[in-house]
Image: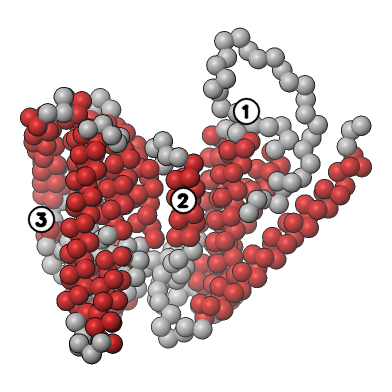
Amino acid sequence: MAPPDVDAPAAPAAPEAPARAGGTGADPPAPARGKPSRLRFVRRFGLTGALLMAIGSLGAGALPVPNPLFGIRVVGLLARNATIALALTYAGMGMLVLAWLWLGRSIRTDGHDVAAVVRTAVTWAAPLAVAAPMFSRDVYGYLAQSEIAGRGIDPYTLGAAQALGVDDPLTRNIPTIWRSTASPYGPGFLTLGHGVLELALAQRWLAGAVLISVAAALKLPALLALGFVGVHVARRWGGRPRHVAGAVAALAVVAGGVLTAVSLGSGLGFGWIRTLTVPNAVVNWMSMSTWTGQLGGQLGILAGLGDHTRSVLTLTRSIGGLASAILCVVLLLAVLRGRLDAVTGTGLGFGAVILLGPVVHPWYLLWIVLPLAGCALTHRHRQAMVLVLAGAAMLMPPTGSGFDLRPYQLPMAMLGGIVILAAVLAVSCRRRRARSAAAPATALP
């Protein structure tokens, strides 16, 4: 869908300036003079969506229990009307996703500079930065794990319920399934990004390897990126088996040293190794290996073979893990032979590990996108990534929790969000037609 301003008449074109001497013809297109209004519309449309999400978060976000907004005039209204708050949030999500798609199209056709795009992104992010938490209640788990460690208790041995007590405000806000589980995380969040990987692939690959190892101490799958750094370095050294062995040995020493230093330096030790399988307790439909296992178990029940869902699930998850390992080896060999660059290999490797893993959340897709965003993908591949991300942005309910006892609420909220979004688009299109009709009267002869 094109933004409503796309078809508006452009200002008369100015005479073409002569080309500068020495020009190569490869410079990026300069922003068109008649297009700033389109960017302004896209920016304001996305800002409106972000504001709706921020307002809706007061009743539809992952708010603490008890909700501190109850009893506050005006502000507390949305907290008591969750369906309306959800509708506003879904409408805002749709507007923000549409604005993001339009921004990408505007960049390709109008050639906006980086500063304009950054201003747009900051404008959209500002309301969300002060909004209530949305889409996940994990933030309360992170706070609880930090509180446990701050009290001198091992978070890799006791869960929040045992360490803090079931009446602790943080424990009460953690989903029930996680209240008694030990922490599967390191001292922070995953910080691996494309910039870190680029640093590792440059001359300062050793410094990049250290940063990736630190990221692995926060979230272990980041260690996969180190494998692609290793084969990239081995290829630069000559690509022979001895070069691969040397790179593997060097990076193993770096990773082992960093993980040991972080584990001992934090005072938490190596208990995190015991809890790496804790997230597998979730049965997640977005994971291919998990939903195939669930499907196999249900088919067995229908066939009268009994309920063997747990065994089938273990089998399919094991097959998924083996398949992802094989794919990663293939990608590593492709990088070593020069058929694939290391950044693309890392993105595809993360894709194999995440999509075939036991648990997948929508935000896990960012692990795949961040490396691939800087790669020389074809236009068709980029379009596919954009569509996948746009769809993933709408998958998770803003509350970060299920609707088992209120299944009617989510469809009603979605319908309300669609109505609001349609109304906004209708008004925008009407304004476009009005401007188009008025344009001939003011056009230059």
Q: Specify few, some or many for label 3: CA neighbours under 10 Å numbering under 14, 14-19, or 20 or more.
A: some
Residue drawn at point x = 69 percent, y = 43 percent: 38
- Which is nearer the eye, 412 or 44? 412
Q: Which of the numbered marks, if any, corresponds to residue 270?
A: 3
- Category of crowding for the residue at label 1, using alpha-carbon neighbours closer than 10 angstroms: few (below 14), some (14–19), many (at least 20): few
Q: What label sits on residue 69 in the rendered view? A: none
Quadrant location of residue 416? Answer: bottom right
419 horizontally vs 100: left or right? right
- Mark 1 and mark 2 lie on one chain; the one further toward the N terminus is 1
Where residue 32 appears, as percent x and y from the top left, is 68, 32
Secondary structure at badge 3 equals loop
233 w.r.t. 397: above or below: above
Label 2 and label 3: CA atoms lie apart by 40 Å
**Looking at the image, is mark 1 or mark 2 nearer the viewer?**
2
Q: Determine the residue positioned at 70% across, 66% down.
A: 423
Q: Which residue is mark 2?
A: 384
Question: Can you say whether 430 is above or below 217 in the image?
Answer: below
- Give the labeled residue for mark 1: 30
First in residue order: circle 1 vs circle 3: 1
Name the residue type under label 2.
Answer: Ala
Secondary structure category for the residue under label 1 = loop
Residue 5 in the image: x percent, y percent? Answer: 72, 48
Q: Position of residue 122 (x, y in %)?
A: 53, 45
Residue 174 visible, this angle:
no
